[in-house]
Amino acid sequence: MGSMVDANPDVVKRAHDEGHVIANHSYSHANLINLDEKGIQNEVIKTNQKIEKIIGEEPYLLRPPYGSFNSKVKNATGMEIALWNVDSLDWKTRNSNAILKQVKSSVLPHSVILMHDIYSTTADSLDPMIKHLKSQGYEFCFVDELIDVI
């Protein structure tokens, strides 16, 4: 989110410098389908500009809040939409064991796992999750490599 970019520009730069894909998630986490075209563009353009100022390029991927988008959102932004097919439910359970259990029971080849950076329990679940997924033969890649799969 653009508001998080404002608060953590060093994290955005580090992630980019380490080779991660930086996507747009709107500025204020508004449900974009409830906005008019101008409102959608304001949410996205403001965030794109902030990200570009930090990493030197505009994002080309949009992960719409709530996964909510339609042709109006797609046309207003002109960006590729990045979604997920496994919800860790971290936003709901706020429990690292529950997050791990949810992912273990849902993951399949070509999964994109939805996780958030708002609760420490999500971060706490990462090490055991990564170890488990690797032990099952899963490999990690960048989300833009799976756009056509989702």
Image (cartoon, grey):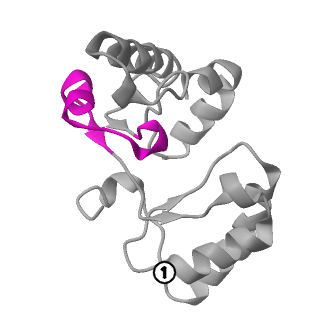
Question: Which residue occupies the foreground of this view, 5 or 33?
Answer: 33
Total number of numbered discs in the rendering: 1
Against 31, residue 66 (above or below) is below
Question: Which residue occupies the foreground of this view, 53 or 90?
Answer: 90
Residue 59: percent from left, percent from top: 37, 30
What amino acid type is highlighted by mark number 1? Answer: Tyr
Question: Which residue occupies the foreground of this view, 87 or 58?
Answer: 87
Against 45, residue 123 (above or below) is below
Residue behind mark 1: 138
Q: Residue at x 26, y 40 (%)?
A: 80
Quadrant including the C terminus: bottom left
Residue 52: percent from left, percent from top: 44, 19
Question: Which residue occupies the foreground of this view, 88 or 9?
Answer: 88
Residue 51: percent from left, percent from top: 48, 22
| Left or right position of 29 against 37 | right
Res 109 quadrant in image: bottom left
Question: Label 1 neighbourhood size at 10 Å, few (<14), some (14-19), many (20+)?
Answer: some
| Left or right position of 40 against 3 | left
Quadrant including the N terminus: top right
Helix, strand or loop at label 1? It is loop
Q: Residue at x 32, y 61 (%)?
A: 146
Against 126, residue 101 (above or below) is below
Q: Residue at x 48, y 46 (%)?
A: 19
Residue 66: percent from left, percent from top: 48, 43
**Magenta stretch bounds:** 63-81
Res 136 quadrant in image: bottom right
